[in-house]
Image (cartoon, grey):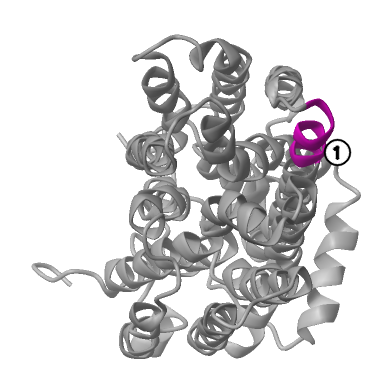
Amino acid sequence: MKGRIHPAFVVAGAVFVVLLCAAAVRATPSILIVPLEREFGWSRALLSSAVSVNLVLYGLVGPFAAALMERFGIRRTVLVSLALICAGVAFTSQMSASWQLLLTWGVLVGLGTGTTAMVLGATVVNRWFVRRRGAVMGALTASTATGQMLFLPLEAHVVEHQGWRALLLPLVALLVRDRPADLGLLPYGASPDTPPLVPSRQHPVGNALRVLRESALKRDFWLLAGSFFVCGASTNGLVGTHLVPACMDHGIPEVRAAGLLAVMGIFDLIGTTASGWLSDRFDSRKLLCCYYGFRGLSLLWLPQAFDAQVLGLPVFAVFYGLDWIATVPPTVRLTTEAVGVQDAPIAFGWVVASHQVGAGVGALGAGLIRSTLATYTPAWVAAGTICLVAAIAVLRIGRRAPGVGLAAIAAPQP
């Protein structure tokens, strides 16, 4: 393989594009909230409930998607999920009632984007890489948040074009392979004596539930799931859904507000990629403590940022964007250490499910607060506070001596 690019990077590049575009689709309702509120008279709480369904399904489908990839392969599973996304977007042009928003963006797009999400990245990294797992997971994770925010300024003008998403189908069909063994290769960085990951022949639902049952006996799993619940509530659920409407409450135009999310997306790409590099080299517990701590302080300052004239929100966008989902690479690593390489993608899927339940709670709770109190301030303060609690809790995640199932975990890079 000297002088050639290892196919693992080709697969990772194709998956990066899929994650980027799928995340952009999932984020579209955040810029539809105010226009739909004006056109149909739907309340902020009602619209937030549709977003909450999307967020919860996005997470709950994760462990089952990982099990489907284990049983039927990455390529076939992703192709089906992209078809669901295209259908959900296409049906939106016929939407005239709130239940249709619930069906299209809540159910179809929620299921489709939940399959092409963080568990897809974790599965690819787990199968195709032994070295540089953290760095690659950081890049793939950054694509999910960056896609949500980077395309929002464009989608603020045009949100109903789905043709470009169909281009992802041949991209996946041509470039994505299920396992290195399909090409007669070892994973990137593996040696001939690296224990192989054996494909599962279990029923996907039974396999996903088995991993949940076994993981639930471990304290570290619950600490990871609980901290990721907070992560979801304070990112996708709160800021990802409600920052644009909150900016409009303060007289900031919709496109300019979407531009703030684009800035956050750019800095997230930097921060989360760097987080992957750091997770290969430093204690992931301490990294998570720093990330949740800085996020909590940023959210507590956000109410003042709205009144800080020119620099307030841009400064918030930079600092918040740097750790938007920088929590993912160290969480993936700690999950792998807790349950072993073989079950890590599915276990991480359950951790992501907790993340998205938190996102749903955050989206709905902030919508109810805004509808009841006519302000988002209590939502920012509550989210900042629970982030500080999570920063302390993650330090309780214990280190584990590598066992038989961890032999394939990459050593820290020099």
Residue 211 occupies which quadrant of the picture?
bottom right
Does residue 176 appear in the picture of this structure?
no
In this rendering, does residue 35 appear at all? Answer: yes
The quadrant the C terminus occupies is top left
> Would you say residue 69 sits in the magenta stretch?
no
Q: Residue at x 75, y 68 (%)?
A: 98
* Above or below: residue 102 compared with residue 137: below
Left or right: 228, with 187 as reference point: right
Say which residue appears at 83% left-offset and 41% top-offset: 222
Q: Compared with residue 114, is residue 229 higher up or lower down, i.e. above or below?
A: above
Q: Residue at x 63, y 63 (%)?
A: 345
Where is mark 1, residue-wise? Answer: 219
Residue span colored magenta: 365-373
x, y percent for residue 390: 73, 25
Residue neighbourhood size for the residue with mark 1, other residues' Cα within 10 Å, grouped as few (<14), some (14–19), many (≥20): some
Q: For residue 284, what is the image quadrant?
A: top right
- Which is nearer the eye, 59 or 225? 59
Within the magenta stretch, is there residue 372?
A: yes
In terms of secondary structure, what is the magenta stretch mainly?
Answer: helix
Picture coordinates of residue 305, whole percent (x, y):
50, 14
> Which residue occupies the foreground of this view, 240 or 196?
240
Q: Position of residue 352 (x, y in %)?
A: 69, 53
